[in-house]
Image: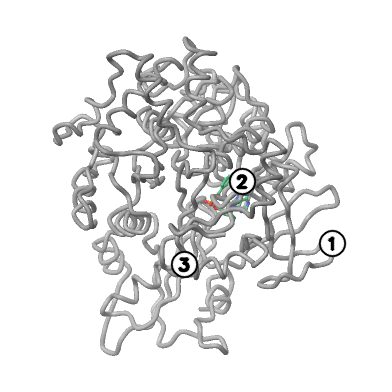
Amino acid sequence: MTTDDGLVTWPEDLAYAYRTAECWRGRPLGDYLWEWADRWGEQVAVVDGDRRLTYRELAELADGLAEHLSENGLRRGHRVLLQLPNCWEFVVVTLACFRLGVAPVMMLPQHREHELSAIAAHVGVRALIVPDRWRDYDHQALAYRVAAGLPGPTPVFVFGEGTRAPGRDGRDLLRADGDVEARRRRLDALAPAGDDVALFLLSGGTTAVPKVIARTHNDYEYNIRRCADVCRFGRDTVYLAVLPIGHNFPLANPGVLGTLYSGGRVVLLPSPRPGPAFAAVETERVTTTSLVPAVAITWTVAATDCGRDLSSLQQVHVGGAMFAPELAAALGPALGCEVQQVYGMAEGLVCYTPVGAPPEVAHRTQGRPLSPFDELLVVEPGTERPVAAGTIGELLTRGPYTPRGYYRAPEQNALSYTAAGWYRTGDLVRLTDGGDVVVCGRIKELINRAGEKISAGEIEMLAQELPEIAEAAAVAMPDPAVGERLCLFVQLHPGRGLTLRRLAAALTARGLAAFKVPERLVVLDELPHTPVGKPDKKALRLTLMPGVDR
Ligand code: OOB
């Protein structure tokens, strides 16, 4: 069923079943904040450089901020765009939003005007929350430009050193003075329901238009609880967050929220560079982290003779893109810990190889679903016809933490979800006899660059708006370091010229995030086409294979 607002809900009979089975507890995520503080109050919850927050401080700061946001007009059902890097403020803001029932839309710090404006308009956000600067980029100015293009007045809250906006300076909002208990009660009274949207995640995306996934408090809490359980998180867990925590994987699989849920300690770093990461492992006695394969490869190499004591590491989770079995086998010995592979998606389903799995499972499969209520169906690509057991096909899935459709996207939903509510992952998989998923490829048109997904359609549409380009096709080009890079094949208008540099400059000027800018440009007299008239990407991809004549 779709609400008037464009939210696709689970069918009532299934919702009833998920509640009865206690997958869904009907408790908003903000509710847990004080439960944690009451249980583990003086324990350190979050470490960011010199800043160490206890569970109690976290709860008090989040409540203080929630009240400020509420005084600024934000309330249950509203949405805000959240673009902060990995920092303690991110955690406080997210929890403050959960407390109020305001849903943050999880953007990446790398996103620029193109992404921010489209998503902000699509979701209808009431405020923007940004750092003042990050990696030499003025996010405050960016946010004001985005806000100016939105229909209503949209306040910008800025966290950082050089903020300007009076009353909206993040430093003023991160204070927990006054009567903590009274505030706690006031906020308890404003709490959202379990079925409310807790947050919006961005889809890895294959389309030109943005797609966002609304995750409810019920479904997300279940996902966090199951992930923490499957990965055996507990009070001894010290989780190092090195991937951008706006992503589902480091945020909640089990990631930052799974660690807090378990009474562990979260250590935040702004990047996965091995030097600072290994130093943090040593000083904070980190037990676990999550990596994408591209980072896992650099860590495997860098760990040898790194001069750091990595002995506290017990497990690392690797997922987000294809991970070759030989590389999976090499990572554990290099770091001296166990590797758990993760196959997941912002759309819901998450699979893990179990703790203690034998090598043929741990290295060669991407694991099994989190929940006994997850349903997996492997079909002939693009159909709903199941393939023979053990053969490769497209994976469809349904379950208690896999929403039934994208938010406000009925046309896309007709393509990405079947009438019976299955999500078409676009991934090619096979299931082993033991029930483990092996990811074998994909049919969806995206470029998976070090785990960051780039939609081919989005880049093609932008490129075709440039005056030089008649037709464009974005294709994944295999790469040993980052897995895939974006290669753009183009046909130019007669008499026009284009270089990669000019293309990159033009797309950047349109506000495209840097990681999505093509890294290779191939100009052809004419693109090859399939019989239905679409660019023949299979043929184009072949020309990129080593040893094939160009
Ligand atoms: C994770 O989430 P997204 O939404 O950025 O991307 C999902 C897509 C999947 O459909 C698949 O194409 C690919 O990323 N993927 C993998 C993979 N894990 C994800 N492909 C091959 N092997 C794997 N292990 O990437 C994500 C979300 C939660 C946990 C882990 C990853």
The answer to whether 462 appears left or right of 232 in the picture is: left
Which residue does the numbered mark 1 point to in the structure image? 389
Frontmost of labels 2 and 3 is 2
Q: Earlier in the sequence, mark 2 or mark 1?
A: 1
Query: How much space separates mark 2 and mark 3, taking CA atoms?
Result: 23 Å
Query: How much space separates mark 2 and mark 1, taking CA atoms?
Result: 25 Å
Assess whether mark 3 and mark 2 are in contact (beta carbons under 8 angstroms).
no
Instruction: Determine whether 427 is above or below 467 in the image.
Output: above
Query: How much space separates mark 3 and mark 1, taking CA atoms?
Result: 31 Å
Q: Nearer the viewer, residue 308 or 147?
A: 147
- In the image, what residue occupies the spot 58% across and 52% down? 403
Which residue does the numbered mark 2 point to in the structure image? 401
Residues packed near mark 1 inside 10 Å, few (<14), some (14 to 19) or many (20 plus): few
Instruction: Determine whether 306 is above or below 165 in the image.
Output: above
The image quarter in which residue 179 lies: top left
Q: Quadrant of the N terminus?
A: bottom right
**Residue 181 x/y as whole percent:** 38, 14
Give the amino acid at mark 3: Thr
- In the image, what residue occupies the spot 46% across and 17% down? 55
Residues packed near mark 3 inside 10 Å, few (<14), some (14 to 19) or many (20 plus): many
- In the image, what residue occupies the spot 61% across and 20% down? 311
Helix, strand or loop at label 2? It is loop
Give the amino acid at mark 1: Ala
Helix, strand or loop at label 1? It is loop
Which residue does the numbered mark 3 point to in the structure image? 207
Q: Earlier in the sequence, mark 3 or mark 1?
A: 3
Assess whether mark 1 and mark 3 are in contact (beta carbons under 8 angstroms).
no
Residues packed near mark 2 inside 10 Å, few (<14), some (14 to 19) or many (20 plus): many
The residue lying furthest to the top in this view is 42
Q: CB at mark 3 closer than 8 A to ligand 1?
A: no
